[in-house]
Structure formats: C-alpha cells, structure tokens
Amino acid sequence: MISCAWFRTRKGKLIDERRVHVLYKDGFRILRAVVYLIKEEKPFAFFSVVARLPTALLAASLAIFGFLSFTCGLILDTASRGRAESKRLAYLSVPVRFTSVKSMDP
C-alpha cells in the first residue's frame, strides 16, 4: 500500500507530497540565480564597501552578536521543550485511581 499525502497550495491546487521538495528546490535555484546576477551586475551594491573601520567593526560585532543570540535561542527552546516533555511523561506515569460510583439503579 502506498501512502501519499497531499498539500493544498495558496491557489487551492492539490500537490503530491513527492512534488513539494521539487518546488522548494526550484525556488532555491531561482533565488541563487538572482543573487548571482545581482553580484555580477552591481558588485559594489552587493558587497557594500565600507569606508571606515569603526563601521566595519560595528557591523561585524552586530553580526556575531546576532548569530550568538540565535544559537542561544535554539538551545533554550530545545531545553524548554525537553523539560515540558519530561513533565508530561512524569504526569502520565502516575497511576490513575478510580473510585467506584454506586449505580442509580434500585
């Protein structure tokens, strides 16, 4: 038996699961081509030449700080999800005690 999931696009068209990765692959190819063309046609705008050293240091330090913040966020998110899952498993491991309810039948 072959299982196949279907996804609905923004226009309401159904797409097979096997075609979704092809769509992303094509999108990345187009994006790479656009970046390459911009780099070849206007290299100074692409690389944005920095005239002063303090500006370059500020830009580099902000980039490093952004990367570190992103990495710390990923680590904290993973840790909080792990704690939530541990709490959920601990809650589910507690045995359930049922009390007998007397029936209303005479």
Image (tube, rainbow, N blue to C red):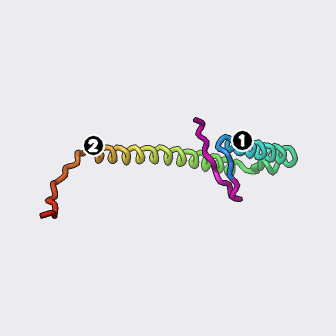
Residue 9 is marked as none
Magenta segment: 1-13
Residue visible at 68% across and 58% down? 12
User: Is 47 or 18 nearer to us in this picture?
Assistant: 18
Q: Mark 1 points at which residue?
A: 22
User: Is 79 or 13 nearer to us in this picture?
Assistant: 13
Q: Reply yes or no: does residue 77 show up in magenta.
A: no
Give the dominant element type of the magenta stretch: helix, strand or loop: loop
- Looking at this view, name the residue that lies furthest to the right: 41
Earlier residue among tags 1 and 2: 1
In the figure, is residue 86 to the left or right of 53? left
The quadrant of the image that shows the C terminus is bottom left
User: Is 66 or 81 nearer to us in this picture?
Assistant: 81
**Mark 1 burial class by Cα count in 10 Å: few <14, some 14-19, many 20+:** few
* Placement of 16 over or under 9, stated as above or below: above
Horizontal and vertical percent position of residue 11? 71, 59
Residue visible at 64% across and 43% down? 17
Horizontal and vertical percent position of residue 85? 37, 45
* Placement of 99 over or under 16, stated as above or below: below
The amino acid type found where label 1 is placed reads: Val
The amino acid type found where label 2 is placed reads: Ser
Residue visible at 60% across and 47% down? 61
User: Is 68 or 103 nearer to us in this picture?
Assistant: 103
Residue 93 is marked as 2
Horizontal and vertical percent position of residue 33? 81, 43
Horizontal and vertical percent position of residue 86? 34, 43
